[in-house]
Structure formats: C-alpha cells, structure tokens
Image (tube, rainbow, N blue to C red):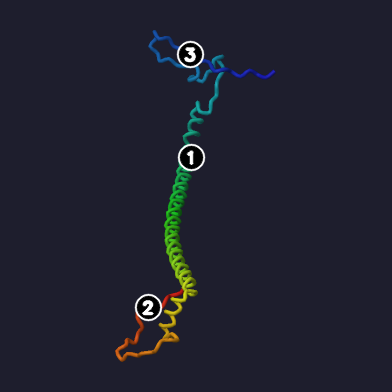
C-alpha cells in the first residue's frame, strides 16, 4: 500500500491575539501539520542562497539570448528592406523594358501591314528615286538635296 502524502492544511495561528505576539504559521516555522520537520530547499538559508546565486547567471543568459534575438530581428528587418528596395528597382526596370518591347512590336506590326499596301510601296519607291511608267522626270535646279518628311526612315527594331 503506498504511503499517504501529507495534505496541505491551512496555516494555523500558534499565538493568541491577546498575548500581543506576532502570529506565526506552521508552514513558516518549518514544522508540518502533524508536528514533523519539513525541509524545503527554499526554506533554509543555503537553499535561498543557491537560488539567489543562480539568479545573476540566469539573468546573464536571458540577457544574452535577448540580445541575440534583437540582433537577428534587426538583421531580418534590414534584409527585408533591402529585398523590397531591390525588387522595386528590378520591377521598374522590367516595366521599362516591357514598354520598349511593346513599342517595337507595334512598329513591326505596322511595317508588316504596310509591306503589302501598294500606296506605301509606291511612296518608298519614290523616296529612292523611282518614277512611274507614264511619268516624266523633271529635275529642278532649286530642288532640295534631302527628300522631305514623306521619306523619313522608319526605325525597325
């Protein structure tokens, strides 16, 4: 049969209120409810000293861990800010490249659609100096050396 564990009883006052002494409890005097001695590691002077002597070491370890946590958190925040700035710059550059490529695609689509247009082909031929079958060539002495705007070159990507 297992031994019965002592139950905790409410503290009893050992001095009467008439005597003028300070009341003490059974738990505070180191004596249990049944009259046997109670040994508590915190109750003795050595036990209290051990707890207090470990406190600075525990506080130092807690401070060290807290400091490491702060350093890690600071690094993570800095890294997140750096990544955010880098991604914003790369996104801006990519959007500029996409806009340029879309412009190039539009130019190529216009050139492709104009390549089969007879009016456009006739204009390109005139810019290069060609004339039609039924046309006579007349050269003016005051003619400009550069062709006009209708012969502006089209930039192809």
**At 49% across and 19% down in the image, what residue appears?**
29
| Distance CA(mark 2)–CA(mark 1) | 87 Å
- The residue indicated by pointer 3 is 12
Point 44% across, 11% down: residue: 15
The front one of 108 and 124 is 124
Q: Earlier in the sequence, mark 3 or mark 1?
A: 3
Q: Quadrant of residue 36?
A: top right
Q: Residue furthest left?
A: 142
- Mark 2 or mark 3: name the one nearer the start of the chain: 3
In 3D space, how far apart are the residues under numbered discs 3 and 1 (Cα atoms)? 36 Å
Residue at image coords 47%, 68%: 105
Q: Position of residue 109 (x, y in %)?
A: 48, 69
Work out which residue is located at the far bottom of the displayed protein and give it. Answer: 141
Precedes in sequence: disc 2 or disc 1: 1
Q: Nearer the viewer, residue 52 or 109?
A: 109
> Is residue 71 shown left or right of residue 2?
left
What residue did someone put label 2 on? 150
- 129 and 54: which is toward the camera: 129
Dot 1 falls on a residue whose secondary structure is helix
- Residue 128 point in image, percent of width and height: 42, 84
Task: Label 3: state its secondary structure.
Answer: loop
- What is the number of the mark on residue 89? none
Mark 3 touches mark 1? (CB < 8 Å) = no
Residue depth check, mark 2 versus mark 3: number of the one nearer the observer: 2
Closest to the camera, between mark 2 and mark 1, is: 2
Marks 2 and 3 sit apart, C-alpha to C-alpha, by: 114 Å
Neighbour tally class for label 3: few under 14, some 14-19, many 20 plus, Cα within 10 Å: few
Label 2 neighbour load within 10 Å: few <14, some 14-19, many 20+: few
Question: Which residue is farthest front?
Answer: 134
Please give the residue where the numbered disc 1 appears in the rendered image: 58
Q: Position of residue 31 (x, y in %)?
A: 53, 18
**How many numbered circles are shown?**
3
């Amino acid at each position: 049969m297992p031994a019965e564990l002592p139950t905790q009883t409410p503290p009893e006052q050992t001095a009467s209120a008439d005597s003028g002494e300070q009341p003490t409890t059974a738990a505070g005097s180191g004596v249990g409810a049944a009259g046997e001695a109670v040994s508590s590691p915190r109750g003795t002077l050595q036990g209290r000293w051990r707890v207090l002597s470990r406190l600075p070491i525990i506080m130092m370890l807690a401070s060290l861990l807290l400091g490491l946590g702060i350093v890690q958190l600071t690094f993570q925040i800095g890294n997140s800010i750096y990544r955010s700035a880098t991604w914003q710059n790369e996104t801006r550059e990519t959007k500029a490249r996409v806009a340029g490529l879309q412009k190039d695609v539009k130019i190529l689509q216009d050139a492709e659609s104009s390549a089969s247009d007879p009016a456009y082909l006739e204009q390109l031929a005139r810019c290069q100096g060609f004339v039609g079958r039924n046309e006579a060539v007349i050269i003016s002495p005051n003619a400009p050396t550069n062709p006009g705007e209708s012969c502006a070159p089209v930039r192809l990507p």
